Image (spheres, rainbow, N blue to C red):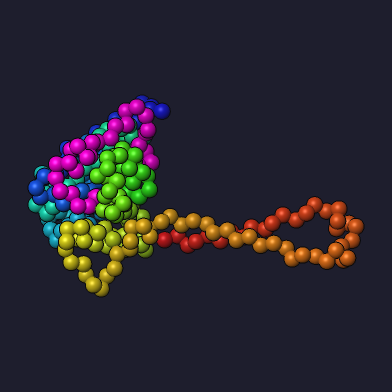
Amino acid sequence: MVTDRDRFTKCFGKVFDSQKSKVLILGTLPPYGREWYYQENNLFWEILSEALDVPELAKPNTTARKKKEILIANGIALWDIFQCAWRKEGRAGDEFIISNKDLKANKIYDEILSKGNIDCIIINGLEQALMWFIENNPEPVVKDMISSRKVVSLHQTKWIQTYKSDEPKYRLNWINTIKKALGKSISSDTKSVKPQEIKRPQSTIRKTQAKPVNAKTVNKQETEQKPKKIAFVVKKNKTN
């Protein structure tokens, strides 16, 4: 439900060239009124700077217009899954996007895929963002790209720094995925983590049952007791 504190936001115009763009990077929807990935803790421009070997992308004084020119010149297209939506209190993050009648998706096939030669789609986000992309893009071309693993979902660049010890791994995975999609060489002394291997930790449950008791040794008082329940031993994986 939308309240007075929530903010209606729209995506920016797409960054795309029908002749030059080879890799499409899709976010969900910018928070409001500023350039792409403007938050201080968002590593998007740093990652793109390293992947494309263009230091200017990571400089704070580089204008949005200049960034677009650099992306197009290097084969990168940029857009969002959604055209517009309400955000809870205007906050960034997929969890703050409000699902109602005003949530509208961009026509990614009509506006980009049908007009160019995109070889790879990178989703800036994991399960939720990928689900939204699939739900709003039912075209056969998109299904073919998914089945041939040309659609990759990666950790949100906004949250990579919060993982601390795993930050280098996730950052490197972004860099190597972009390089590979553009046909650039990847350093042999570093290996990226496959996107499908990046999963949230889950609990593993092991069942243990009591050993059978000889019926002759069971006294009357023990037989009147309620049967013992199966014990569950829960072991939690260490967080990544």
Residue 92 visible in this rendered orientation of the protein: no
Count of marks, rendered view: 0
**Looking at the image, which residue is at 89% across and 61% down?**
219
| Residue 159 x, y percent position in the rendering | 33, 52
In the image, residue 81 above or below residue 117: above
Picture quarter with the N terminus: top left
From this viewpoint, which residue is outermost toward the bottom?
189
| Residue 75 x, y percent position in the rendering | 13, 52
Q: Can you tell which quarter of the image residue 31 is in?
A: top left
In the image, residue 153 above or below residue 96: below
**Looking at the image, which residue is at 32% across and 28% down?**
102
The answer to whether residue 217 is left or right of residue 237 is right
Residue 109 visible in this rendered orientation of the protein: yes
Q: Nearer the viewer, residue 131 or 119?
A: 119
**Looking at the image, which residue is at 89% across and 56% down?**
221
The answer to whether residue 198 is left or right of residue 141 is right
Q: What residue span does the magenta drawing correspond to?
A: 93-122
| Residue 171 x, y percent position in the rendering | 28, 60
Picture quarter with the C terminus: bottom left
**Looking at the image, which residue is at 46% across and 57% down?**
201
| Residue 105 x, y percent position in the rendering | 28, 35
Q: Tell me if residue 120 is in the magenta stretch.
A: yes
Q: Nearer the viewer, residue 155 or 88?
A: 155
Q: Tell me if residue 158 is in the magenta stretch.
A: no
